[in-house]
Image (cartoon, helix red, strand yellow):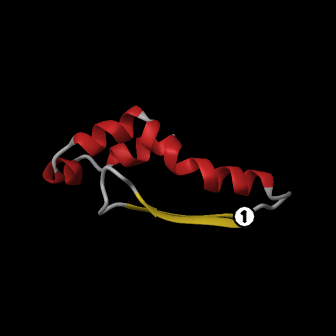
Amino acid sequence: DQYIIDQFMELPDHLIVAVFDGHSGTFAAEYSSMNLKSKIEESAAWQAYAKMSPKDRKKNSTKVGEALL
């Protein structure tokens, strides 16, 4: 099992909190814990969300979900 608790550099008031269960071994859990945050930050949806004003982020929170796809 692995976990992450970390802030996003562009938005320090946003956290990523995740637990990864390595059901069939540790590779997937380790890989995910080391790479998920950077993959989110690299996505166009996250970058668009991070550039919004706080008011616009509240109205467009679906961008965060899109960054997870």
Indicate whether 46 appears above or below 10: above
Q: Position of residue 33 (x, y in %)?
A: 63, 56
Q: Position of residue 15 (x, y in %)?
A: 40, 63
Q: Is 41 on the left or on the right of 34, as rendered?
A: left
Q: Quadrant of residue 14?
A: bottom left
Q: Is 35 on the left or on the right of 44, as rendered?
A: right
Which residue is depicted at the point 39% across and 32% down? 44
Residue farthest right in this picture = 24
Q: Is 49 on the left or on the right of 56, as rendered?
A: right
Which residue is depicted at the point 30% across and 50% down? 61
Q: Position of residue 66 (x, y in %)?
A: 42, 41
Q: Is 46 on the left or on the right of 26, as rendered?
A: left
Instruction: For residue 68, say whether it is visible.
Output: no
Which residue is depicted at the point 28% across and 45% down? 50
On-image quarter of the N terminus = bottom right
Residue farthest top in this picture = 44
Residue farthest front in this picture = 9
Under circle 1, the secondary element is loop
Q: Amino acid at mark 1?
A: Asp
Residue holding disc 1: 21
Q: Nearer the viewer, residue 34 or 54?
A: 34
Q: Residues within 10 Å of mark 1 (few under 14, many from 20)?
A: some
Q: How many marks?
A: 1
Which residue is depicted at the point 20% across and 43% down? 52
Indicate whether 22 appears above or below 51: below
Instruction: For residue 35, say whether it is visible.
Output: yes
